[in-house]
């Protein structure tokens, strides 16, 4: 037998014209099947078949009888007749021996795709098939012509069936299930189909799952899980799909795992058959390969059922479900088709044979019905036909290989098999593409999207929350800052208020001081007026100035004379020396010169003595002149002039100031160069002269307000107080007291003086000193201390007032003026304390017995004394508590006099007001018949 033809659905000599395959599209997705257009040519046994009807998969009824050549049928499917190939097994060893003398019962004409079945030696029947495969055809060839077109259709989305039908031992299993482990050329259709499928699909987008089942005596068993031995068949009447719920489904990713799966299935099939005491030939083996493929490329817009204006397209864009094609390849290795009687079955085996034949005969009946275009197709008669409902008269592409053996002994079985094949060739299927939206995948994608959106939403919410938190923090911070600013403002306002209060206080104090100053200046003016009458002091100052000038002139003259004499002596020495030996000795000139030289030396020594004494005098006079100036500067107030002198003062003092300025400058220089510490250390020198000079320098410095603080800081006050206590020298004590008086002008220093026992030292000095100038300085210092409100009690308790009063013994007007000033200062402070309620009871001045002296000097001719006493009296009279003592002491008359005669209007008015406002004074005046 020569093999020339080839079996191709779309090719071959008897293939019809190529028709573009158009699939039925349940989802309206346009696509074009790229290859394998089904040939509508129908191979027939002699007579060609008429157009075959196809069975609707859902109803089992014929859906139309259109010619396959027309392409698409009424339902939109592609007509595709069941393709049938016949395969002849080669003679086996037994047949070689047994049938050696017989010719084969079949004669194959593969090139004509014909098979001749010999009835006897002279008669034979010829049958046309889609393919005739002889014993020489390889497994590869069988696969390519029988199964490959089906596999390709499956990969395109159509269901497909490849089935082997034939008598036991004719090679069904060899054709379908041979694993070809030892010889790969022997691999059967199952292995090769999976190879092609795996090669075509994308592991990323597509999936292949496999179930392997056995149908035995109308029971579906799971060959991948033997325990699962009664699997129900569930049909979807709408889609015509058959499902086997509970069957093991294994995903296949590679060929090796598939081979292992087949081996497992085969082992289980063997085990099951052993258990049931049967053979594999009596069961149907069904391998189901489910292919799920993603359709790539952009789907048609129309398919998304958009509304008219296309609104929602953008919304739907993200909701498009991917399209997938689901298809199923069913490979069926049928049980042997031999007749029961032939297999010699009995009993159970008979029942078995019936069951086996039940399925096979049901299949045959269905095929007959389909082939004859019968109105009834008994699909539901057996499980096999229910499982294969899509393969015959359904939407699958089906290829049937009928296997026959060569032995003439099986002629009847062979003929029956051939007839089965012939009928099957008349069955027309309508292939349908099954595309669907992959809602699961869409769902998964949407879930991912929802997750992403939720995460994004959460992120944004968190960001919003964070920014809100930040904003709140900022608001809180801003509030804090505002509160802080408010607090600062409040404290600033508070401190400003305090400052304002302080300034007001200072202002009041300044006013008070100015008032005092004005009073003092007026008093001073009065005093100076009175001094005009007595020019003695001023004269002495002038005289001192003249004397100083005279001494300076004399000194200058003497210096000049000395220089001349020295010059002369020098010249004479130079002229005379060379001639001494001869001429001078002779003339007695040497003696004369000697005498003259002697005179000159004496003269020089005398001049030097004179210079020394003049220098001493000069210093003494300078100091005195300076002191005089300061006394004048201070007037009776005890305050040093600081540039606010009245014009009268300036006039009075400018004469002595000229001479004092030189020394002042010298002292300032000394202060700068030597340093205060060194000067102060000289106060403790053993040398009296040094101490005298040092204390004078310090006193001069203390006269300047600018230096006072530095002196006190450097311990100068303490040193001065020590000098006052320990020094025997009158000058030192006088000058020290003067310096202390100057320092006592400052309120802080007043407190320091008191704290360092100054009042006691001053009191002691006041008691001991005789020199009016010393007493004046001491009185001045105490008077200054009397002006401090805070020190009143301490000053009085430590004997300050009694010391003041004691100094009046000297009678010197300067001393008395300072005493009066001290009393006035004290009275003023006391009066202020009384007014402020800080003091009660009689004046301490009265307590300490000053009243008689006050009354006695109230009308002193020396105006500085008088003015101070007048003021003191006015202060004392202002408080009723003193009134009786004042009356008793005779002060009332003095007050009346002041209120009438005082040249100072302010004091006069004060006295008047005091008298009028005091009921005690008024009573007394009335008693005295003195109107006021
Ligand atoms: P069946 O499944 O139809 O009962 P088998 O496939 O089991 O038959 O085949 C029976 C025997 O014949 C096996 O030993 C097998 O190897 C052998 N055989 C079948 N077909 C061929 C073939 N075409 N070429 C070589 N040996 C074959
Ligand atoms: Mg078999």
Image (spheres, grey):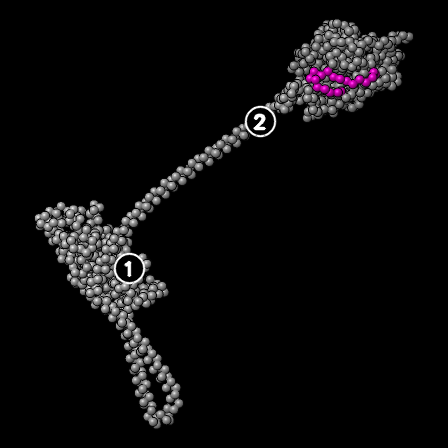
> Which element type, helix, strand or loop, lies under badge 1?
loop
Percent coordinates x, y for residue 619 in the rendering = 28, 70
Residue 709, compared with residue 260, is above or below; it is below
The residues colored magenta run: 15-33
Q: Is residue 139 visible to us here?
A: no
Question: In the image shown, does 264 or 720 lie closer to the viewer?
Answer: 720
- For the N terminus, the image quarter is top right
Circle on res. 453: 2
Residue 537 to residue 295: above or below: below
What secondary structure is found at the residue carrying circle 2? helix
Residue 16 among those drawn in magenta: yes
Residue 750 in percent (x, y) is at: 26, 55
| Residues at marks 1 and 2, CA–CA distance in whole angstroms | 94 Å
For residue 645, the mark is 1
Residue at x 29%, y 76% (from the top left corner): 554
Q: How crowded is mark 1: few (under 14 residues within 10 Å), some or many (20 or more)?
A: some
Quadrant of the image occupied by residue 160: top right
């Amino acid at each position: 037998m020569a093999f020339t033809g080839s079996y191709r659905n779309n090719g071959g000599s008897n293939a019809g014209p190529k028709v573009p395959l158009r699939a039925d599209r349940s989802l309206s997705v346009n696509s074009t099947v790229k290859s394998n257009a089904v040939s509508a040519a129908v191979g027939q046994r002699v007579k060609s078949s008429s157009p075959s009807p196809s069975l609707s998969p859902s109803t089992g009824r014929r859906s139309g009888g259109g010619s396959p050549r027309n392409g698409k049928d009424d339902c939109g499917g592609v007509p595709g007749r069941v393709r049938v190939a016949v395969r002849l097994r080669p003679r086996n060893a037994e047949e070689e021996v047994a049938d050696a003398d017989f010719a084969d019962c079949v004669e194959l004409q593969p090139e004509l795709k014909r098979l001749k079945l010999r009835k006897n030696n002279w008669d034979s029947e010829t049958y046309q098939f889609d393919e005739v495969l002889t014993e020489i055809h390889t497994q590869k060839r069988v696969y390519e012509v029988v199964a490959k077109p089906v596999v390709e259709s499956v990969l395109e989305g159509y269901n497909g069936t490849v089935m082997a039908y034939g008598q036991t031992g004719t090679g069904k299993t060899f054709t379908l299930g041979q694993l070809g482990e030892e010889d790969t050329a022997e691999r059967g259709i199952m292995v090769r189909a999976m190879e092609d499928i795996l090669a075509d699909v994308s592991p990323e987008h597509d999936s292949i799952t496999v179930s392997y089942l056995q149908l035995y005596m109308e029971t579906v068993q799971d060959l991948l899980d033997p325990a699962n031995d009664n699997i129900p068949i569930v049909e979807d009447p709408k889609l015509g799909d058959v499902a086997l719920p509970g069957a093991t489904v294994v995903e296949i990713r590679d060929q090796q795992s598939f081979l292992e799966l087949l081996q497992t299935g085969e082992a289980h099939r063997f085990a099951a058959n052993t258990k049931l005491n049967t053979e594999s030939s009596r069961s149907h083996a069904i391998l189901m390969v489910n292919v799920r493929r993603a359709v790539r490329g952009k789907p048609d817009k129309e398919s998304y059922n958009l509304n008219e204006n296309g609104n929602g397209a953008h919304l739907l864009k993200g909701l498009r479900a991917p399209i997938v094609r689901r298809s199923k390849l069913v490979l069926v290795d049928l049980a042997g088709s031999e007749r029961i009687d032939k297999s010699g079955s009995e009993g159970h085996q008979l029942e078995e044979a019936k069951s086996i034949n039940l399925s096979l005969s049901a299949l045959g009946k269905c095929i007959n019905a389909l082939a004859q275009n019968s109105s009834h197709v008994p699909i539901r008669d057996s499980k096999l036909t229910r499982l294969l409902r899509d393969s015959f008269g359904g939407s699958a592409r089906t290829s049937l290989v009928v296997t026959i053996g060569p032995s003439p002994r099986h002629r009847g079985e062979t003929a029956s098999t051939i007839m089965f094949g012939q009928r099957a060739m008349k069955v027309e299927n309508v292939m349908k593409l099954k595309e669907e939206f992959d809602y699961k995948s869409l769902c998964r994608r949407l879930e991912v999207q929802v997750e992403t959106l939720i995460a994004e939403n959460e992120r944004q919410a968190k960001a919003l929350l964070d920014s809100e938190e930040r904003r709140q923090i900022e608001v809180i911070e801003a509030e804090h800052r505002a509160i802080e600013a408010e607090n600062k403002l409040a404290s600033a306002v508070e401190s400003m208020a305090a400052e304002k209060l302080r300034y007001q206080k200072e202002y009041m104090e300044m006013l008070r001081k100015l008032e005092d100053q004005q009073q003092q200046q007026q008093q001073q003016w009065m005093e100076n007026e009175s001094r005009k009458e007595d020019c003695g002091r001023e004269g002495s100052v002038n005289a001192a100035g003249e004397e100083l000038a005279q001494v300076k002139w004399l000194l200058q003259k003497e210096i000049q004379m000395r220089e001349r004499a020295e010059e002369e002596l020098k010249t004479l020495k130079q002229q005379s020396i060379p001639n001494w030996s001869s001429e001078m000795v002779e003339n007695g000139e040497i003696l004369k010169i000697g005498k003259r030289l002697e005179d000159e030396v004496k003269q020089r020594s005398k001049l030097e003595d004179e210079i020394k004494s003049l220098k001493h005098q000069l210093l003494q006079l300078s100091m005195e002149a300076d002191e005089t100036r300061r006394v004048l500067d201070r007037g009776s107030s005890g305050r040093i002039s600081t540039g606010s002198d009245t014009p009268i003062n300036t006039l009075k003092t400018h004469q002595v100031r000229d001479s004092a300025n030189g020394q002042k400058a010298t002292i300032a220089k000394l202060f700068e160069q030597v340093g205060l510490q060194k000067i102060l250390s000289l106060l403790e020198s053993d040398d009296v002269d040094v101490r005298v000079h040092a204390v004078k320098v310090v006193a001069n410095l203390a006269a300047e307000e600018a230096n006072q603080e530095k002196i006190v800081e450097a311990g100068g006050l303490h040193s001065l107080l020590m000098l006052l206590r320990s020094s025997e020298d009158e000058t030192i004590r006088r000058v020290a007291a003067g310096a202390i008086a100057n320092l006592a002008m400052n309120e802080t220093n007043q407190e320091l003086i008191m704290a360092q026992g100054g009042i006691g030292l001053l009191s002691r000095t006041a008691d001991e000193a005789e020199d009016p100038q010393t007493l004046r300085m001491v009185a001045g210092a105490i008077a200054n201390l009397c002006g401090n409100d805070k020190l009143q009690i301490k000053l009085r308790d430590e004997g300050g007032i009694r010391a003041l009063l004691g100094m009046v013994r000297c009678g010197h007007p300067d001393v008395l003026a300072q005493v009066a000033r001290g009393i006035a200062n004290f009275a003023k402070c006391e009066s202020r304390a009384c007014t402020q309620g800080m003091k009660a009871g009689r004046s301490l001045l009265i307590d300490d017995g000053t009243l008689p002296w006050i009354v006695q000097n109230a009308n002193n001719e020396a105006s500085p004394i008088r003015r101070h006493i007048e003021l003191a009296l006015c202060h004392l009279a202002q408080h009723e508590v003193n009134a009786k003592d004042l009356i008793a002491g005779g002060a009332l008359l003095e007050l009346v006099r002041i209120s009438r005669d005082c040249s100072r209007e302010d004091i006069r008015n004060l006295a008047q007001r005091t008298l009028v406002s005091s009921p005690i004074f008024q009573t007394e005046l009335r008693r005295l018949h003195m109107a006021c």
